């Protein structure tokens, strides 16, 4: 009987002993977040998607630690570790309760969304607006109300001179995430092209608060001043813009010369 008990213990996977503990694979610890992100992205690039479950960057004190997997027994962890070591030789198995702070967490859905956003951006830049609009609508059905999708839809409507729709799109994007200067900039141009320059100035100002050297928002500010007859204010913006983006500054200067 003792032999059978001993055999059972030896043949069973080692379990995480304390309640809440689990095994994980640690691939690196870094003083700088950018280095942790490099390794994080390398693992995303080299491993299959099903192997990337619970890939994360944890913060512990002054260190940023790259870990992956959440296993109740060490055998499962060892199986993945063999694959990880083909990419990161220093990978090892640790037992943890998890970090209090997770800086970045891999999500297959987020990865797919990022791919879609890149494709849509490329279509917009090539002027393939009908196809871009179709992909945006499909992405809404797949991912739900995402601020970046509203931002891209606003860009499409702006390019198609649907200014009221564009303003609504950018306003919705801002309501979901008010830390993206491009959304305020887009809203500003939608208002400017709708002959509402005074209101446009407010959105350009908010874009510039988030990114003070945002050349497109500075140019928009100058155009709004010109629409309001404030030529001297537009010239002041032109002087600032010359130091940041000479091409945008040249376009603003030509607009100033055309203004009576």
Image (cartoon, rainbow, N blue to C red):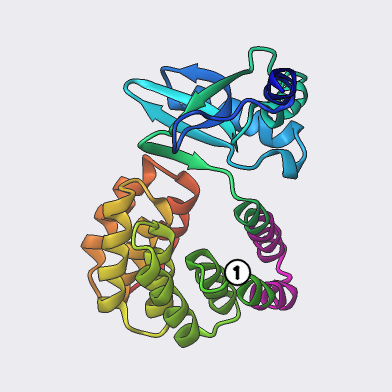
**On the rendered structure, is 221 left or right of 57?**
left
- Quarter residue 109 falls in: bottom right
In the rendered view, does 249 fall on the left or right side of 139? Answer: left
Residue 228 seen in this snapshot: no
Residue 221 in the magenta stretch? The answer is: no
Q: In this image, 21 relative to 159: left or right?
A: left
Task: Please state, as top left, top right, bottom left or bottom right, where the C terminus lies in the image.
Answer: bottom left
Does 158 appear above or below 62? below
Residue at point 67%, 28% (across, down):
77
Q: Is residue 17 in view?
A: yes
Count of residue discs: 1
Residue in the picture at 22% in, 61% down: 233
Looking at the picture, how far across and down is residue 204, in whole percent?
Answer: 32, 64
Q: Element under label 1?
A: helix
Q: For the point 40% across and 64% down, which residue is it? A: 185
Q: Nearer the viewer, residue 216 or 86?
A: 86
> How far from the left and from the top, in percent, is residue 245?
44, 45
Q: Nearer the viewer, residue 211 or 62?
A: 62
Q: Which residues are magenta?
A: 115-137
Residue 23: percent from left, percent from top: 56, 29
Image quarter of the N terminus: top right
Furthest-front residue in this view: 1
Q: Residues within 10 Å of mark 1 (few under 14, many from 20)?
A: few
> Mark 1 sits on what residue?
143
Question: Main SS of the magenta segment?
Answer: helix
């Amino acid at each position: 009987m003792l032999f059978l008990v001993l055999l059972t213990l030896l043949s069973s996977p080692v379990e995480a002993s304390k309640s809440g503990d689990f095994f994980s694979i640690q691939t690196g610890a870094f003083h700088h977040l950018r280095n942790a992100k490099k390794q994080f992205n390398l693992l995303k690039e080299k491993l299959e998607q099903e192997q990337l479950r619970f890939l994360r960057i944890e913060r512990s004190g002054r260190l940023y630690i790259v870990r992956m997997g959440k296993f109740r027994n060490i055998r499962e962890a060892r199986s993945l570790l063999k694959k990880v070591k083909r990419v990161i030789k220093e990978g090892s198995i640790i037992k943890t309760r998890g970090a209090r702070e997770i800086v970045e967490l891999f999500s297959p859905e987020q990865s797919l969304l990022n791919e879609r956003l890149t494709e849509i951006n490329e279509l917009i830049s090539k002027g393939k607006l009908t196809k871009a609009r179709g992909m945006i609508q499909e992405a809404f059905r797949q991912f739900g109300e995402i601020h970046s999708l509203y931002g891209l839809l606003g860009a499409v409507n702006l390019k198609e001179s649907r200014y009221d729709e564009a303003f609504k799109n950018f306003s919705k994007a801002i309501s979901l995430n008010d830390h993206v200067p491009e959304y305020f900039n887009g809203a500003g141009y939608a208002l400017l092209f709708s002959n509402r320059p005074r209101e446009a100035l407010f959105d350009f100002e908010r874009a510039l608060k988030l990114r003070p050297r945002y050349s497109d928002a500075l140019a928009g500010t100058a155009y709004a001043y010109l629409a309001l007859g404030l030529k001297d204010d537009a010239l002041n913006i032109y002087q600032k813009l010359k130091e940041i983006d000479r091409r945008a500054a040249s376009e603003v200067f030509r607009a100033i010369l055309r203004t009576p």
